[in-house]
Image (tube, rainbow, N blue to C red):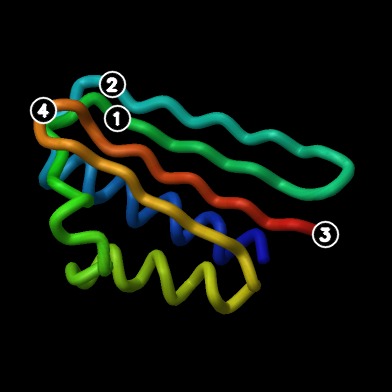
Amino acid sequence: MEIVFFRILQEFFSNTIKHAKANYLDIVVNYKSDGIFITAKDNGQGFDTEKDNNFTGIGLTNIKRRAELVNADVTIFSKRGQGTKLTITYKY
């Protein structure tokens, strides 16, 4: 499970570095009694998830598939000019 979360975050970091043109990346990991909650967000150029929220890119598809491997929920929200936010929720 830890490796899957690591790989998801690694993919997000890679996308941020390669595509987002961000200069800020924030990661928050919350361990609670009912689960693990991870949020990663950047201040990059973003993209329009409202128009294309079906994980069409290879990296985004990999993020979704890896989350499914451990029964975690993953959401990605992005808006042009406002960066991208990844949320991973894993309930015990």
Density class for disc 2 (Cα within 10 Å; few <14, some 14-19, many ≥20) is: few
Secondary structure under the numbered disc 1 in the rendered image: strand
> Quick one: label 2 or label 1, which is nearer the N terminus?
2
Q: Residue at x 44, y 37 (%)?
A: 40
Query: Is residue 29 positioned above or below 60 on the image?
Result: above
Q: Earlier in the sequence, mark 2 or mark 3?
A: 2
Disc 2, disc 1: CB below 8 Å?
yes
Q: Secondary structure at mark 2?
A: loop
Q: Cα distance, mark 2 to mark 3?
A: 31 Å
The mark nearer the N terminus, 1 or 4, is: 1
The residue where tag 4 is placed is 81
Q: Nearer the viewer, mark 2 or mark 3?
A: 3
Q: Horizontal placement of 56 versus 85: left or right?
A: left
The answer to whether residue 67 is left or right of residue 8 is: right
Determine the CA span between mark 4 and mark 2: 13 Å
The residue carrying mark 3 is: 92
Labels 3 and 4: the sequence-earlier one: 4
Q: Earlier in the sequence, mark 3 or mark 1?
A: 1
Kindly report the distance in space between the C-alpha atoms of the residues bearing marks 1 and 4. 11 Å
Q: CA distance from mark 3 to mark 1?
A: 27 Å
Query: According to the image, label 2 marks what residue?
Result: 24
x and y, in percent, of residue 52 in the image: 17, 60
Where does the image place residue 26, in percent across and percent down from the top left? 42, 25
x then y, percent, for residue 48: 14, 47
**Type of the residue with mark 2:** Tyr
